[in-house]
Image (tube, rainbow, N blue to C red):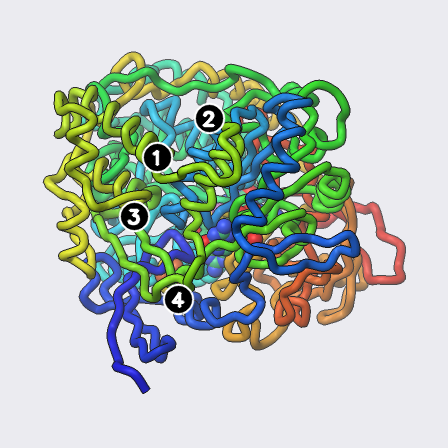
Amino acid sequence: MGETRTAYRTCPLCEATCGLELTVNGAVTKVRGDDDDPFSHGFLCPKGVSLKELHEDPDRLRTPMRRLPDGSFEAIGWDEAFALIDERLTPILAEHGRNAAGIYLGNPSAHNLSSLLYGRVFIKALGTRNIFSASTVDQYPKQLASALMFGTPFSVPIPDIDRTQYFLCMGANPLASNGSLMTAPDFRGRLKALQARGGKLVVVDPRRSRTAETADEHFFIRPGTDALLLAAIANTLFAEGLADPGAAGEWLDGLDEVRSLMEPFTAEAVAPHTGIAADDIRRIARELAGAESAAVYGRIGTCTQTFGTVASWLVDVVNALTGNLDSPGGVMFTKAAAGGANTKGEPGKGSGVLFGRWRSRVRDMDEVFGEFPVACLAEEIETPGDGQIRALFTIAGNPLVSTPNGDRLTAAVESLDFMVSVDIYINETTRHADVILPALSALEHSQYDLAFNQFAIRNVAKWSAPVFEPPAGALDEWEALLHLAAIAAGAGADADIEAFDLGVAGEIARREGADPSSALHGVEPEQIVADSAPWVGPERIVDLWLRGGPYDLDMNALVAAPHGIDLGPLEPRLPEMLRTQSGRVELAPERIVADVPRLVAALDAAAPDGLVLVGRRDLRSNNSWMHNLPLLVRGPVRCTAHVHPDDAERLGVVDGSLVRVASRAGSVEIPAEVTDAVMPGVVSIPHGWGHDAPGAQMDVAREHAGVNSNVLTDELDLEPLTGTAVLNGIPITLAPVGVAPVAEAATA
Ligand SMILES: Nc1nc2c(c(=O)[nH]1)N[C@H]1C(S)=C(S)[C@@H](COP(=O)(O)OP(=O)(O)OC[C@H]3O[C@@H](n4cnc5c(=O)[nH]c(N)nc54)[C@H](O)[C@@H]3O)O[C@H]1N2
Ligand SMILES: Nc1nc2c(c(=O)[nH]1)N[C@H]1C(S)=C(S)[C@@H](COP(=O)(O)OP(=O)(O)OC[C@H]3O[C@@H](n4cnc5c(=O)[nH]c(N)nc54)[C@H](O)[C@@H]3O)O[C@H]1N2
Ligand code: SF4
Ligand SMILES: [Mo]
């Protein structure tokens, strides 16, 4: 037995960024919440505890792997892996051009400083336009709406949950997900505190979720109709003279345009579509306007649906109309310590947002924030011609499970000339890779939440040191990605990545030196970089940004504060945080306004008469990749189809029996769970399952395989402004296995 020590580490598994206290004696012997973390105050969830199992998982990759012709994998050295990648990739790029390479960045890369920063470096070196990520099955509608209104995709208004007196939560289940685009460790505790101080929690969701169960009021809503509901709330506010933006009004443009745009959406016109009574809609509007403070929040359910951007926009239109934009207890703008997009450049003005600069080859979709919709990935691989993807990189992603029409994408990926994955498992996606480069265990690398600190409900900064030294010879992801960048840049498999990294830091230093709002303004780039010694890699970048940032911080200050640094509650930031070209809040951005006629048309459309599919998250899942940990998969089967008792009775479905669920894209067979926790006409299946793929090497997950709900989601059904996949509200049929599906109307 060695010495027992205590290590502090931010949990990298979800956006809550809880501080953990790990007891280590050779191995991790205990994981608990860090009571001294000024943000999470000792909170953690079962996933945080499972970091020990994740670290020790025998299936987790420790060395690079090469796929052999029979589909099996053999371990190889790093040098051999890079040589192989150079040998295969370089001729493809030479012969077919840069766009012959495609890249997909998955969700954990946002939680991992290494891949967050150096994934971008690799993309730049690759020089392809075929860039995809999990963002187009997730939050781009919210980021586009925020960018158009406030000037950057990171300027998302964040509910001031600790001070609000009214929280309207739409299409989010933070008691299971622990929150998203709203970093708030211990969501349950914060909601309880809200209720204890006399505040009200209202949930709008087609399911009675865990969050809905604790709410003061829950409304079932027909999937995909949130934009109509919000428009009717806005309409009511105008009609009843309740629209008053308060102090933010000084900075708003487009109020009159919004008023006239909202005219068709009376509560009466909207009610039959949403399933929420007109009187209730008006009451919600009055309560929002009358509350001492209120925050409307929408997430996956309002983003990954047909009106994703319009709904995300209307969330903040309502926040603005009720005087809650940029106001304590309303929705506010985080001021990040490092790398905050709206702390750079001239305060109060910017270049706005860029999109549509180029278009996808096959479906002619706009790029958004430099990316194409991941729902276009399969066709870009399948379709011959200039720019066809022949080599694919996946970094921290499992798109074959996480993105629509998994069957089509699987077939497409099988036709690639070459594929490389940077990952920790051989799973449904990476089993197709010719080479897999392993990422370190979460406990072997450092952590700073560059992304989530920009969406946090308080201003915080925290760096965690690795808990364990990486194994001898192992590369951290940033080093592996720099090697890939060097190969893509034509510098070969054994390029000097230290020099490459210095170039990366030099470029950031140059920008800081030139930025009038940086604390490093006017300093020579060489000096800026030299002052960061001895930090290199991701820490050097964080140090540069901290030193240039709005607080008097650097890496050394973070090292001295292992529990994290609280930089205080959110404060009003208008107009300083704006980066729109006008220097105003654009309440009626042209691009969004252009989609409103589609919403008006929805008022005339007949309510859909069949069943529709929505997703759900479970506390002990994390998208597709944590089902290999025994702690998280024990207990009853969780990959089930929730069916309302009325629908079950009509369709002859018995609780626990196998049903066949089919959509345009595909079909699955799954056990039914008959429950009135879903509204009639709605079926719910969680995503991230389907772990029975041949060749995947995740033994525990295979025993709890479940089915992949993204076999059912449709790669042709996209939210038009961002190309985000419609993952909620998918038309389906459902029938007991062995019985032909009945194409009849669902009674609602
Ligand atoms: N139907 C439906 N589909 C959905 C959703 C939904 O609600 N419904 N949600 C969507 C959302 S919000 C998201 S974010 C996406 C997620 O989509 P993806 O990011 O594609 O999928 P994940 O399941 O998160 O897979 C993460 C991958 O990263 C690997 N990994 C884990 N840690 C690390 C690491 O530190 N480094 C590296 N290199 N790899 C690592 C895992 O082994 C796994 O292969 O799924 C989307 N898909
Ligand atoms: N335990 C766990 N935590 C996670 C994850 C996980 O997989 N498991 N994934 C992480 C990721 S990547 C993300 S992005 C976040 C997501 O965090 P959340 O947005 O909180 O995600 P969900 O829990 O899927 O909640 C979405 C809710 O929307 C509802 N919904 C579906 N369609 C509609 C609709 O049309 N309108 C309305 N109003 N509601 C609708 C669903 O029933 C569901 O309850 O969670 C993160 N945290
Ligand atoms: S809530 Fe999220 S950050 Fe906190 S312990 Fe659980 S998985 Fe980790
Ligand atoms: Mo996500």
Reply above or below: 454 against 372.
below
> Which residue in the protein does label 4 denote?
48
Mark 4 vs mark 1, CA separation in Å = 37 Å
Other-residue count near label 2 (Cα within 10 Å), few / some / many at <14 / 14–19 / ≥20: some
Other-residue count near label 1 (Cα within 10 Å), few / some / many at <14 / 14–19 / ≥20: few
Mark 3 vs mark 4, CA separation in Å = 30 Å
Badge number at residue 369? 2
Image x and y of residue 611, in percent = 71, 47
At 60% from the left edge and 62% from the top edge, which residue is drawn? Answer: 676
Image x and y of residue 717, in percent = 67, 33
Mark 2 vs mark 4, CA separation in Å = 32 Å
User: Disc 4 or disc 1, which is closer to the eye?
Assistant: 1
Which element is circle 1 on?
Answer: helix
Mark 1 vs mark 3, CA separation in Å = 53 Å
Which element is circle 3 on?
Answer: strand
Nearer-the-camera pick, 734 or 245: 734
Q: Find ligand 3 in the image and state its quadrant.
A: bottom left
Contact? badges 4 and 1 (CB < 8 Å): no
At 72% from the left edge and 30% from the top edge, which residue is drawn? Answer: 379
Badge number at residue 166? 3
Q: Quadrant of residue 215?
A: bottom left
Amino acid on which disc 4 is placed:
Gly
Residue 484 in view: yes
Amino acid on which disc 3 is placed:
Tyr
Label whose residue precedes the other's in the sequence (2 or 1): 2
Nearer-the-camera pick, 134 or 59: 59
Image x and y of residue 741, in percent = 85, 52
